[in-house]
Image (cartoon, grey):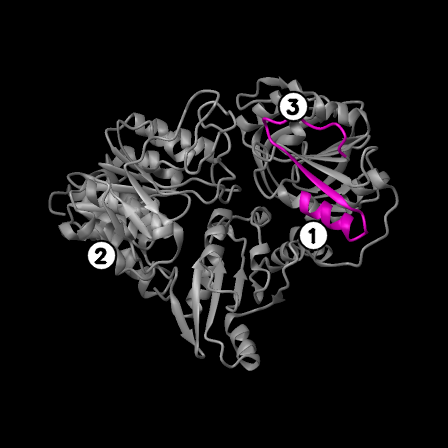
Amino acid sequence: MSDTSSRLRIVWIYPDLLSTYGDRGNVLILRRRAELRGIATEIVHVHSSDAVPVEGDIYLLGGGEDRPQILAAERLRADGGLKRAAERGAAVLAICAGYQIIGESYGDDADNPLPGVGILDVRSGRGETRAVGEIVADVDPNLGVGRITGFENHQGRTAIGPNAVPLSRTVRGIGNDGQTEGAYQGQVLGTYLHGPALPRNPELADLLLRWRVGAIPPLPPSWGERLHEERLAAAL
Amino acid sequence: MSELPLRAQLAAALGKGAASLSRATGRGDGSVIGGRVALKVEPDLLAKLARGRRLTLVSATNGKTTTTRLIAAALRELGEIATNEHGANMPTGHITALANSPDARIGVLEVDEKYLPQVLRETNASVVVLMNLSRDQMDRASEINLLAKKWREALQKSETHVIANADDPLVAWAGLGARYATWVSAGQRWKEDSWCCPECGGHLKRDPDPHWECPECGLRRPEATWAVDNATDSVVDPNDQRMPLQLNLPGDANRANAAIALATAAAYGIHPKQSLPRLREIHSVAGRYTSVVTNGVEVRLLLAKNPAGWLESFAVLDPPRVPVILSVNAQIPDGKDTSWLWDVDYTVLRGRRVFVMGERRTDLALRLETDEVPFEIADRVDQVIAGLKSEQPDLTKLDVIANYTAFQQIRTAYGRVQ
């Protein structure tokens, strides 16, 4: 946890710009799964006019339409807080438009490359077709997460550079390019599983918690695990 | 009808035949299939059917069907109205509505958000009514910033008179493209899609509500001449006359719909004093807000398709003693993606008996568990009622909130109640 506080600080970046569909679910599930284990949390909302605090534990970035995405990237680059936090070892979960802008570069609506925040070695552009629908992927075994499921809705295609690793291999759906889905580099993780990726994948939520607080006890299975199994069965 | 060219007459007649078949076989209201058949025969049919009529188009994310119904009720003061009251809101449905009322000189058409530019171009409508834009079924609908831009461009190219909600920044920005506008302060409960300036992307200053302005480019809320006052259940007209609304439809959202309808009727020269009694006669719209009495329990059906709609529905729930059923499906008309469930705050349901139903009830269960709202899993409305009655024989009311196909399933179980 952070040096300045005994609470786990969950920082939601720009909910006014990047919060297309259910991104709030990730904040709620992280808080719940931490508190069920007796870990106190503090939720920090950072609006687009605010400075990004550097002392957070877990940073969340959601999805957004083209214009808000560009505005968010410009503001994050000018602010510099997210980059410094990642360099200090904070965990980052970035979804869809958020995933693209934490990379080295991403494409605008005419596919002109624009610079990203540069904390994940990926480059994104626009594909020919839109990827819409249920997605299933097997996460890198080193992460101990297993199979993840979600919903994707994007036109991006993402190439992974030498410093990052694919998060998973796609079983169904498109993800980065039809072969892999998402990417991670240290404790910075990006994915196209849009909206509530963590509610639908409790193991992924626990990975972020482990990255910041170390070993955590398992929780008794509940509706999150039920939903995970139900969606896997429906998608395959 | 007799003024129509022969080909258009034939197309309209074939369409009506298909519609009757659809109804007779119990497959639907017939509005869509009829129009589809007619369009095959005459692709310009909508423009031809619209010619010589004074049309109003109604579009929004939420409240289209209800507002169309309210406007049509007010305009009946002037005679027969052509309208797609079954909610078939794409060009096929518009063709059916106009073909079914060949002698109506006035029409009110509910229009799907995406089709508004095309329908405006083809019909050359005199009035366009715009109420709100918010996130809705994004796996199949357009992004709303893009929609607003297309509305704005379509309005810039037309001579139409816009009647729009000044309190919704995206809607107002689109409406500012029109040459003639009447602004209504109709309110906006759901603000999560309009924190950014539609013109430049800056962070909007939004207080005191309902005022909004962009500190970066100066875009600001247009001055409204009509206003809803929810606290006193009244509307204020451009002459500063305050009139009690006293609708039979519940909630702030319907006060907003009614104010927009009154402003639209006024554009046709009808005074709100004449319109209001007609609006008050409406108790339900295509099953929405209908109450069905079953097993001695009054079951109220509320349709809510997206986060803004759920927020409005929670606001009209009866006092906490009344149990509520939530039902969610994810079929194509609902959107296949249930992510939006996470945008809604369910903590307001604490202290109420809650049941979850529908094809995606597991999603709802996790969502409620996360907000620490106790709930029970259910299969059918009648089973819930039977169970509740055995524990609580004096139970008299139950609310049901459902998204589109879940709502239709429940409504069908009660005989497609209107």
Q: Position of residue A40 (x, y in %)?
A: 78, 46
**Residue beneath the point at 53% across and 21% down:** A110
**Residue beneath the point at 47% across and 55% down:** B315
**How far apart are the alpha carbons under marks 1 and 2?**
51 Å
Which is nearer the N-term, disc 3 or disc 1?
Answer: 3
Q: Is residue B47 left or right of residue A232?
A: left
Q: From the viewer's perspective, is the residue at label 1 or at label 2 nearer?
A: 2
Q: Does the magenta portion include A45?
A: yes
| Quarter-of-image position of residue A48 | top right
**Residue beneath the point at 39% across and 68% down:** B291
- The tag on residue B278 is 2
- The tag on residue B359 is none
Q: Is residue B109 visible?
A: no
| Quarter-of-image position of residue B251 | bottom left
Residue linked to disc 3: A76
Is disc 3 surrounded by few (<14), some (14 to 19) or many (20+) residues within 10 Å?
A: many
Give the quadrant of the N terminus of chain A.
top right
Q: Residue furthest left?
A: B2
| Nearest the eye: B42 or A88 | A88
Residue linked to disc 1: A232
Looking at the rendered structure, whether the residues under marks 1 and 2 are on a common chain is answered as: no
| Secondary structure found at label 3 | helix
Q: Is residue B366 left or right of residue B29?
A: right
- The amino acid type found where label 3 is placed reads Leu
**How far apart are the alpha carbons under marks 3 and 1?**
35 Å
| Host chain of mark 2 | B
Q: Which residues are magenta?
A: A27-56
- The amino acid type found where label 1 is placed reads Leu
Looking at the rendered structure, whether the residues under marks 3 and 1 are on a common chain is answered as: yes
